[in-house]
Amino acid sequence: MAANLPLLQLPSISTPSLHSKLHSKRLNLTTTSTSPAKLKGTSRYSTITCSSSNGRGPDSTDDSVKSVERILEEKKRAELAARIASGEFTVEQSGFLPQLRNGLIKLGVPTEILEFLSKWNNAGEEQLAIPLAKGAISAIRSQAFFIPLYELYLTYGGIFRLTFGPKSFLIVSDPSIAKRILRENSKAYSKGILAEILEFVMGKGLIPADGEIWRVRRRAIVPALHQKYVAAMISLFGQATDRLCEKLDAAASDGEDVEMESLFSRLTLDIIGKALFNYDFDSLTNDTGIVEAVYTVLREAEDRSVAPIPVWNIPIWKDISPRQRKVTVALKLINDTLNNLIAICKRMVEQEELQFHEEYMNDQDPSILHFLLASGDDVSSKQLRDDLMTMLIAGHETSAAVLTWTFYLLSKEPSVMSKLQNEVDSVIGDRFPTIDDMKKLKYTTRVINESLRLYPQPPVLIRRSLEDDVLGKYPIKKDEDIFISLWNLHRCPNHWVDAEKFNPERWPLDGPNPNETNQNFSYLPFGGGPRKCIGDMFALFETVVAVAMLVRRFNFQIALGAPPVEMTTGATIHTTEGLKMTVTRRTKPPIIPKLEMPALKVDGDSSITKQQSPAVTASVSISQEDQQLGQKGQVSSAHS
Ligand code: HEM
């Protein structure tokens, strides 16, 4: 019997639902915002992708189990929708006029009169009020927190305020507002609570740092990701993935199912350790103390990012809580290891005779740390450690999550999988991928682009306003905490056709690599503006190589009896109980010799090769913002 996955259903746009109608009314009275549901005027239940079969043929037992699951999920969604409709998340405006309006609605006064009243009221107000929702922490904590934010977005629109007791956040899901915060007026925003939460592990590293420290460090680090470095990384990605293939091969022989999420986490840890400081965690083979320490710290960072109360700030907490004591020990081990690696690398640099230049790279140790030390980067060991630790976290869990959700999505769409396998067979066959293949693996790249759309890592970006600003038509004050929901932007039913469908074909093969610029901030998997990810091309190539090498050798299916694949979140989107898969070796089609010509291609689909016209732009380009910082041609941007 096929394993079944739960169905997450969100009320959005097509069969009218009571709650959205109710809310359209409520919003007309209290705000001037336009919600996506209102824009389309209709409403439907849309399916978010944790759903349906595992790609095997349906049977009737599956169907009935699925319908029970569907009913249960619909019930869950309907309950949340009803809570929104009941006003649990809505703060009624106080004052005479709103109360009068509420009284008039109850008396059945026509909408036109109410709207006139509303305009009259707004005309007297100095500022437009941002649509307001309030919630119980439990509503957010019972599931991945970005899911109820999507629900609220469909009701309240592209910017609304969410309050939990004394805490208040602005939730942004509007591309032009995201652009304003991230690019046009980025100087007016800091990393806010994110910097506070991550301080214990990243210190003043590139992700939490703001102001001058950030500017100086970004200018020092970005050139390390130059073209020659990224090309060298392609073979590192290949070697690491090959080790994973060996593991999977053994599992296939033994008929054992594998938990792919943890394997991907180990794969990307091994890669980033070598790429950053030439250290082989070898976590795919060993569970050493340092690997465990990295995971302890990572889990702590993720837990802190969703914890309602910062208990770790209580002074004696870290001494009395066993968990915090474990974190302190883990942090010390990592810091000692990093200090040691920095010292070893310093000695290597002192002894080498290589002249530093723009595309400097030591072939024995091509790491970013080596580049930074050789560049004469005038920085304290503490700052260097903070930066390395930041990149270790930034470049590890994100890529692992992308691979996890890509394989989940592929297991649901056998037709995408076979198209992907055809491309990989025809482009790389049995050899290791090279940098030149990155331009040719167009469909593979589109699969990653689409996976990043449906499962952005992280699903929200965090900012705090440093000064007053205007977002859309709403003035905001200094010190606002803001969540920019990439999840909502990437699934906006008004912007995307079949927003919930995993459809790599939505990105033309001969078009540019999709990014925030050419998608006008509706798609920003690597962020945008001056704080855009510096590892975007690294990560894109890493995931393309891993996917290509894995699917050319194996088929992947959700394992029989596997737990449902549901989402939970820390900094990135995790599964609640892993991604358990059955891996089988691919049997390639038989070779049919041709008499006239020797068979050059043993398998693969030449038609795909023919269709492929110019570039998936694995381009070496630099962002507008990094140019302003005076950066040279590093491979760190998908900007086209
Ligand atoms: C698929 C993998 C990855 C994804 C989806 C991803 C995503 C992102 C996003 C969305 C941001 C912007 C955060 C914000 O604006 O608040 C970011 C920033 C950053 N990423 Fe990545 N990233 C990935 C891989 C990497 C890798 C491999 C590295 C390191 C080599 C890296 C290093 C960084 C750094 C240092 C920043 C902060 C940049 C700054 O603030 O100036 N990322 N990443």
Image: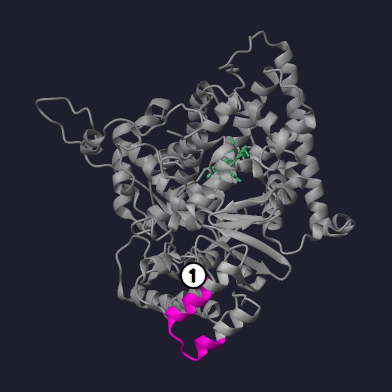
502 sits to left or right of 402: left
Find residue 386 and report its horizontal and vertical position in percent.
Answer: 73, 36
> Eyeballing the image, is 145 above or below 77?
above
Give above or below for 8 relative to 572.
Answer: below
Q: Give the mark count.
A: 1
Q: How far across and down, in percent of the image, does residue 364 sit?
A: 60, 19
Q: Is residue 115 magenta?
A: yes
| Prevailing secondary structure of the magenta residues | helix
Count residues near mark 1 (Cα–Cα under 10 Å), then give few for <14, some for 14-19, many for 20+.
Answer: many
Q: Which residues are magenta?
A: 103-119
The C terminus lies in quadrant: top left
Going by the picture, which residue comes out furthest to the bottom? 107
Q: Position of residue 482 (x, y in %)?
A: 63, 55
- The residue that appears at 74% across and 13% down in the rendered structure is 350
Question: Is residue 261 something that shows in the picture?
Answer: yes
Front in this rendered view, residue 279 or 396: 396
